[in-house]
Image: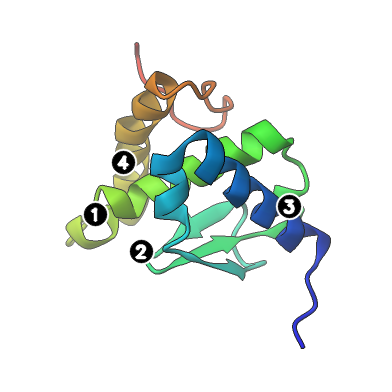
Amino acid sequence: MRQDTPTTLRIQKARTSLILDHPFFGSLLFRLKGRECRSIQTMATDGVSLFYNPEFVETLNAATLAGTLAHEVMHPALHHHVRRSGRDPKRWNVACDFAINPLLVDAGYERRSKNRPQSAA
């Protein structure tokens, strides 16, 4: 029997919130399987799974968690995981973040924190 952790329950609640409040992002999110991963600092996706560091998730309030999940689902929605080819992974991720963040702002999400790329708009 699987034991749900407090972090897993918070992510489940955020998924439900997204499907109700932002069905586009919520429906995309339900295609990804959540997987705890302490080897990453924040969150990541490979287009199949949503990897999250539980310590990072616990630092986020509910609105920021929902926005972060919406951000992550946009990577596979825009096929970033298959379009990178031989590009530098870190530079590619930053470029993709610059493409995603204005879409989230237009959808009503607040700008991401200072340690994440922002659009110039």
Q: Nearer the viewer, mark 3 or mark 2?
A: 3
N-terminal of the pair, mark 2 or mark 1, is 2
Where 27 sits versus 31, above or below?
Answer: above
Q: Does the CB distance between marks 2 and 4 fall below 8 Å?
A: no
Q: Which residue is mark 3?
A: 10
Residue drawn at 51 percent across, 24 percent down? 109
- Give the alpha-carbon distance from disc 2 to disc 1, as whole Å: 8 Å
Q: Which mark is residue 118?
A: none
Q: Residue furthest front?
A: 20
Query: Which class describes the residues within 10 Å of circle 1: few (<14), some (14-19), or many (20+)?
Result: few
Query: Which class describes the residues within 10 Å of circle 2: few (<14), some (14-19), or many (20+)?
Result: many
Q: Nearer the viewer, mark 2 or mark 4?
A: 2
Residue 20 occupies which quadrant of the picture?
Answer: top right
N-terminal of the pair, mark 3 or mark 4, is 3
- Give the alpha-carbon distance from disc 4 to disc 1, as whole Å: 10 Å
Q: Residue furthest top?
A: 121
Where 88 sits versus 65, above or below?
Answer: below
In front here: 54 or 105? 105
Q: Which residue is mark 2?
A: 47
Query: Which class describes the residues within 10 Å of circle 3: few (<14), some (14-19), or many (20+)?
Result: some
Q: Does the CB distance between marks 4 and 1 fall below 8 Å?
A: no
- Residue 24 lies, in percent from the top left, at 38, 41
Q: Does the CB distance between marks 2 and 1 fall below 8 Å?
A: yes
Q: Which residue is mark 1?
A: 79
Amino acid carrying mark 2 in the image:
Gly
Say what secondary structure mark 1 lies in.
loop
In front here: 94 or 4? 4
